[in-house]
Amino acid sequence: MTITAYDECLQSGHIPQDAANPRLQHLCGRCGRLREPDEMQRDVDQERRWTADAATFAQYVADADRAAAALSAFRERRMGDGPWRDVSQRSWRTEALEEVADLSAYLLAAMTALAQQNRDDEDADRDRMLLFMALSASVTAFDALRAVEQEEL
Ligand SMILES: [Zn+2]
């Protein structure tokens, strides 16, 4: 059995306490140990359902069920089904906002690379359209996330 920071607090004779400083809520107020568990369990089935629900509202998606299933499968291959870690130190909304900015940057790089090829064939037209659709989705995501961030202020 693993001894957690919580156990160490008990062994040293105190119950872990809230830190007075709200920025240090992930640390024990008595001894400064990291409070365990600092993680959030995931419900992968719920994640799939939310993704499927969201896909029905997505623009330019012909087959929402198929697109949602493909995104969920790709996400789960990348991150598995383990818990989120270091929860107290992260803002999910800020992370999402930053990733959306990165998404737009990668798409613009792909569009620039395509433009520099000076192609005038149907495949290039199709790629330009698909990259533009993805860039459009990044604008939608950014605008929604910015609205959420402003709600928090
Ligand atoms: Zn402690």
Image (tube, grey):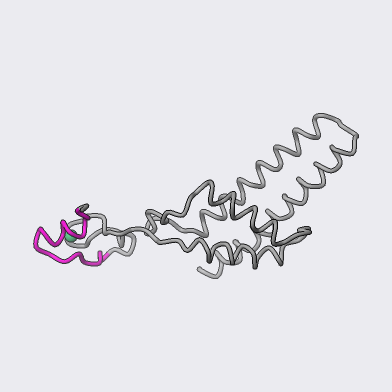
Q: Is residue 13 magenta?
A: yes
Give the side of residue 62 with respect to residue 98, left or right.
right
Q: Where is residue 98 in the image (x, y as percent from the top left)?
A: 56, 51
Residue drawn 90% across the image and 35% down it: 121
Residue drawn 22% across the image and 52% down it: 2
Q: Give the range drawn in magenta.
A: 3-20
Q: Does the magenta stretch include residue 74?
A: no
Splitting the image into 4 quarters, where does residue 72 fall? bottom right
Q: Where is residue 56 in the image (x, y as percent from the top left)?
A: 71, 66
User: Most prominent secondary structure in the magenta stretch?
Assistant: loop
Residue furthest bottom in the image: 151
Q: Position of residue 11 (x, y in %)?
A: 11, 59
Residue drawn 59% across the image and 66% down it: 50
102 w.r.t. 54: above or below: above
Q: Find ligand 1 in the image and state its quadrant.
A: bottom left
Residue furthest left in the image: 13
Give the side of residue 22 with respect to residue 4, left or right.
right
Q: Where is residue 153 in the image (x, y as percent from the top left)?
A: 50, 68
Residue furthest top in the image: 117
Task: Using the image as rendered, state which of residue 145 and residue 70 is in the foreground.
Answer: 70
Total marks in image: 0
Residue drawn 82% across the image and 47% down it: 129
